[in-house]
Image (tube, rainbow, N blue to C red):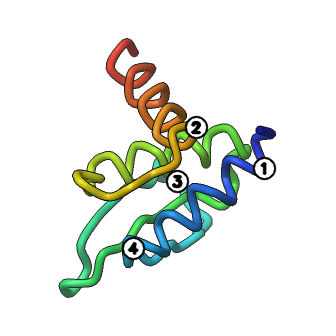
């Protein structure tokens, strides 16, 4: 799976979970937040696709994927990004 395909899959998962994505410019890393009770994941528009994937994967993990079915390849990609973040 290419980075672009993985990124599209992660965006689709966020949509399925009811998480709104916002791509903004600025001096910030991004991540999951609640804004007026709306589930929101903010991603820096200037990031490379791999960094957008990492931000999105970490945000989805923080939201909690629990009992939701996620394709194994997608679950593995999220777990890999979480493991990299822990090791950093």
> Could you classify mark 3 by the number of other residues whose Cα lies within 10 Å: few (under 14), some (14-19), or many (20 or more)?
few
> Could you classify mark 4 by the number of other residues whose Cα lies within 10 Å: few (under 14), some (14-19), or many (20 or more)?
many
Position of residue 56 measured from the top left corner of the image (x, y, whole percent):
50, 51
How many marks the image carries: the answer is: 4
Residue depth check, mark 3 versus mark 4: number of the one nearer the observer:
4
Q: Distance between the residues labelled 2 and 3?
A: 31 Å
Q: Residue at x 33, y 46 (%)?
A: 61
Q: Do the residues labelled 2 and 3 touch (CB within 8 Å)?
A: no
Q: In which quarter of the image is residue 50?
A: top right
Viewport quadrant of the C terminus = top left
Q: Distance between the residues labelled 1 and 3?
A: 23 Å
Q: Residue at x 54, y 34 (%)?
A: 77
Q: Is mark 1 on a helix, strand or loop?
A: helix
* Residue corresponding to mark 3: 27
Q: How far apart are marks 1 and 2 (CA)?
A: 14 Å
Residue depth check, mark 2 versus mark 3: number of the one nearer the observer:
2
Q: Is residue 33 above or below residue 56?
A: below
The extreme top residue here reads 87
* Residue corresponding to mark 1: 4
Q: Earlier in the sequence, mark 3 or mark 4?
A: 4
* Residue corresponding to mark 2: 73
* Residue corresponding to mark 4: 19
Q: Earlier in the sequence, mark 1 or mark 4?
A: 1
Q: What element carries label 3?
A: loop
> Could you classify mark 1 by the number of other residues whose Cα lies within 10 Å: few (under 14), some (14-19), or many (20 or more)?
few
Residue depth check, mark 1 versus mark 3: number of the one nearer the observer:
1
Residue depth check, mark 2 versus mark 4: number of the one nearer the observer:
2
Q: Is mark 2 on a helix, strand or loop?
A: helix
């Amino acid at each position: 799976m290419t980075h672009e395909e993985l990124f599209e899959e992660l965006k689709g998962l966020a949509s399925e979970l009811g998480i709104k994505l916002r791509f903004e410019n600025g001096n910030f890393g991004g991540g999951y937040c609640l804004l007026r009770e709306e589930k929101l994941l903010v991603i820096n528009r200037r990031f490379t696709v791999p960094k957008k994937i990492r931000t999105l994967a970490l945000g989805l993990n923080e939201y909690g994927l629990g009992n939701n079915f996620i394709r194994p390849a997608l679950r593995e990609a999220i777990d890999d990004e979480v493991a990299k973040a822990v090791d950093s």
